[in-house]
Amino acid sequence: MESKEKYRVPVSQKPHVVEKPRDINTIGGTVTIEINEKKVSVPMGTTILEACRENQIHIPTLCHHDDLCVAGVCRVCVVEVEGMRTLQASCTFPITAPVKIHTSTPMVRKARRHIIDLLLSEHYGECYSCFRNQNCELQKLAKEYGVDQYNFGHLEKPRYETDRSSASVIRDMNKCILCKRCVRTCIDLQEVGVLEAINRGHETHIGTFFDKPLSDVICINCGQCINRCPTAALRANDPSDELWEAIENPKKHVVIQTAPSPRAGIGEEFGLEPGHSMTGELNTALRRIGFDRVFDTNFTADLTIMEEGTELLNRLKKAVLLGDESVKLPQFTSCSPGWVKFIEHFYPEFLGYLSTAKSPQQMFGAVIKTFYAKESGIDPADIVSVALMPCSAKKFECNRPEMRASGYKDVDYGLTTRELAQMIKEAGIYLPEMPKSHFDEPFGDASGAGLIFGATGGVMEAALRTVYELVTGREVPFKNLNIVPCRGFEGIKQASVMLEGCKDEYSFLEGIELKFIVAHGTANAKKVMEMLRKGELKDVHFVEIMACPGGCLGGGGQPIPTSEEIRKKRAEAIYAEDESLSLRKSHENPYVKYIYENFLTEGPCSELSHHLLHTHYQKRGKFIA
Amino acid sequence: MKPNGNKYAVRQGAVLFSEYAPGSGIKKALEIGRENILLELRESKLKGRGGAGFPTATKWMLVAAAKSEEKFIVCNADEGEPGTFKDRVLLLEYPELVFEGMLIAGYTLGARQGIIYLRGEYEYMLKSLESYLEQMKEDNLLGNNILGNPNFNFEIVIRLGSGAYVCGEETALIESLEGNRGEARNRPPYPVNTGYLGRPTVVNNVETLASVPHILVKGGEWFRTFGTDKSTGSKLFSVSGDCERPGVYELPWGTKIKDLLEIVGAKNTKAVQVGGASGSCIPKSQFERTLAYEDAATGGSIMIFNESRNMLKILKNFMEFFVEESCGQCTPCRVGNVKLLEGIEKIERGVYTFGHLNKLKELGRTMQVASKCGLGQSSPNAFLSILENFKEEIFNKNGYGGHNGK
Ligand SMILES: Cc1cc2nc3c(=O)[nH]c(=O)nc-3n(C[C@H](O)[C@H](O)[C@H](O)COP(=O)(O)O)c2cc1C
Ligand code: SF4
Ligand code: SF4
Ligand code: SF4
Ligand code: SF4
């Protein structure tokens, strides 16, 4: 379970969870109720919505989301409960007595239709010019309830200006239905707290601190709100028009790197069940669209492991061998730009703990416009470097002023899974039918270690596979290299491996228990940072943090909808692919070896690699002027 | 010192304005003990004076039965319903009744803290109320070991509201006390189980609490001699509008509207809005009806309109109030009230159709049953009752369906 036990949102938006009995066989553990005249038995405290779902009775919902606490605000899930004066919101109503429920009476159907009509009356937008067309919960509901006219009108002019200030997230409040899922995501799931309902009554809208543009507040760009928005009110900043232009421009050499998570998710955009990896098909489709080269971000994930792993060993050496107390340990991963911005805003005093290694995306960007440009004899000014990412924060990341190590913008565009799927469809391609093909050389080989970066715990697992072997000369002592303690969706995982039989150069680590922590979702990151602040992480060496619940496979650029179930399926696909590969350790990637032999000749964490592959951070703070 | 002691003698009434010796209620309470207090309260059949009319004894018993180390007594002094100002009179002139009511509740239910949620506009009372509380502390009626009873500790704090009407709704009030946006919570569960800080909480109206000391001293049976079978005791009515003597009146429940109009000197009355903006509008033909929970219920607001008034304008005022005061949380209320108001504006402009108005009436009925809190559930009352009871006037004035009419 991703941690759902604590709620930080106001109680007005919180389920009054009647604690369900641990053993439903105890006396009073279950209640027998009637739903539409049918007797069913449910555990005490089950909500009406849960009970109906259990019994294959469909109840429409809008503000409800399985990842979030309950709000009870849209009211479309109302049902009749005998003996109660008003209809009851089924998502909030805990069953504690033998109630009789009716889910489809004339009053219920009329109320639901009214609510849909009211939402539509305030909705500015036409479905055919909308990116959520055919994947919109409001549209779907309108269809379900047979809306064929606007009973209470329809907006003809927008009420709000679209906020396009952010490099990552665009907010068009004209399509907002005030379900507050984004608010609950931001406050509760991510504990960032940028979005809140502002004003009262008809003037209520979702806004930021003093309604400032999103770019000026402490948004970390994770895009989790987008993934949970039922409509097109929230979307990522889509560069595909510019991209098409670049592709059509014969002067431009357009290369794309693809991250692991989009492959595990993109099938969903084409109607496949979650959990289908489409790596080979995607490569073909990308070439057919017109990309000149298709590279694997996993290659620089392997590079990241080399750099970050070496950095860790350097820190450990300083701390353990030289007794330098100023060394910042544990080292925190830095490949999630959502997490990086989070720590820059909320814990700037701890930036020294962050690895200086760039994310795989930015490493690739720097390598493409330097090494690759040189090797292939292309002017870097003519290269358009695109990154296919599961992520909205990557759009912000590639625009950071620090990310111009090549002398150019290292990565020109961050493209999300959803946006690419749209491009593929536009090109007339049905992805699942594509023949499979391989990545392009020279970065065609990547390890399974790079692949599992997509799941929470993956970076840690990849790093351990390499660090352990560098230090001891032996493989990590886990069956099939599967470091199981790193896996799964628990909010914060802690584990350790014992370093024994170290090589001479690492003898100072002999007998040390290498302790690590893996956390995902910034709410959990916050907990870890509070532990750090309290000095509780003194004996921990390495911490992996991913901003998004589930890791990048649950990123803000991934197909909508999302749920724990879907994220699990994507993770399974990624781990299965890793296991199917013969190359599973970053340091064994032949091209990683090649690049250190021919380009970054001083090795990891050298001066050149620092220039190209490492970065620095900004103390942003959480107060906005 | 009482905030406004000098007017004390002027008021007349059977219960609240009847004679009372400060301190006698709590002394009686300590004498008869917790169980008997609850029994006496049940005997009185006192119902909540804040509007919803929930039996007070039941509410207290639920809190008494709730297991928790901490419980709270909240006095709802938000008095936001348009046309209500009777709680102001109680707080200004009879604070001893209100505070003692809270004290008795605290004693009965084992709460150690009482909170008065005072309407923001009543800030001017704050100083004098606080000095009255000081005095009670000095008299050992508040603080520790009250009146020499070991383990009977109770304090009362006053918190100022933020001026939103919805904050008078008990769960929104609690949210506001906790420092959140004033928005109604999901119910169930109710404050009696999960109230302030998640603890069992009694939320009672000022007048409800002020009735309790009288009931204890004079008996539940005595209380029941006033009013009707289902609406016992008497009630404070805040009377405003077209009459000679507006003000606060204590009258037994069951008083006919006609009689009340006479008492306050109302002439040429066309309509009486009973229960404030969220209540319903009663036309002349129904003035025989009685003020009672089972008939024309009210938390106290009585607004009188004479023949010169334009009912559509009045209705528009009410709807503008709700459009503004909806917390904006749930769809039926946030958008529904706007649609009702737009309907009224269409009538005004004479561009409505009866077909559309009928749709709006149905919408109003949905709002009554599907809104999340009492505000949205009651906001269509005025719309429905005024359009129904004054159709002649409204449609005569504004054309039968205007130029789009059918
Ligand atoms: C929108 C709204 C506003 C309310 N405002 C008040 C108020 O100002 N004062 C009050 O005592 N009760 C108010 N209530 C009723 C309270 O929710 C609650 O029922 C009452 O405080 C309970 O006390 P009682 O049982 O003593 O009446 C309001 C209810 C609603 C729905
Ligand atoms: S958000 Fe949904 S309902 Fe609105 S225009 Fe887009 S597809 Fe249509
Ligand atoms: S922006 Fe989207 S998620 Fe947020 S309240 Fe509006 S519709 Fe809901
Ligand atoms: S966890 Fe992955 S998808 Fe989410 S912000 Fe970080 S890099 Fe992007
Ligand atoms: S009914 Fe109105 S005031 Fe009550 S929760 Fe809904 S929007 Fe808010």
Image (cartoon, rainbow, N blue to C red):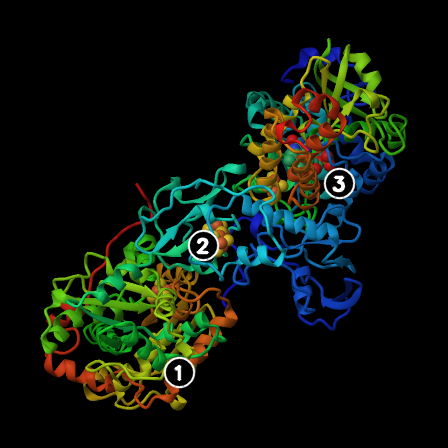
The answer to whether A582 is drawn above or below residue A407 in the figure is: below
Which tag, 2 or 1, sits closer to the chain's start?
A: 2
Numbered badge on residue A566 = none
- From mark 2 to mark 1, how far is it between C-alphas? 39 Å
Question: Residue B158, can we see it?
Answer: no
Given contact means CB atoms under 8 Å apart, are the residues at marks 3 and 2 in contact?
A: no
Disc nearest the viewer among 3 and 2 = 2
Numbered badge on residue A483 = 1
Numbered circles on residues, count = 3
- From mark 3 to mark 2, how far is it between C-alphas? 54 Å
Residue where numbered disc 2 is placed? A232
Amino acid type, mark 3: Thr
Q: Residues within 10 Å of mark 1 (few under 14, many from 20)?
A: some
Q: Nearer the viewer, residue B59 or A243?
A: A243
Dot 3: element: helix
Q: Residues within 10 Å of mark 3 (few under 14, many from 20)?
A: many
Instruction: Specify the subunit that label 2 lies on.
Output: A
Instruction: Specify the subunit that label 3 lies on.
Output: B
Amino acid type, mark 1: Ile
Amino acid type, mark 2: Ala
Q: Quadrant of residue A597?
A: bottom left
Q: Are marks 3 and 2 on the same chain?
A: no
The answer to whether mark 2 is within 8 Å of ligand 2 is yes
Numbered badge on residue B108 = 3
Q: Quadrant of residue B247?
A: top right
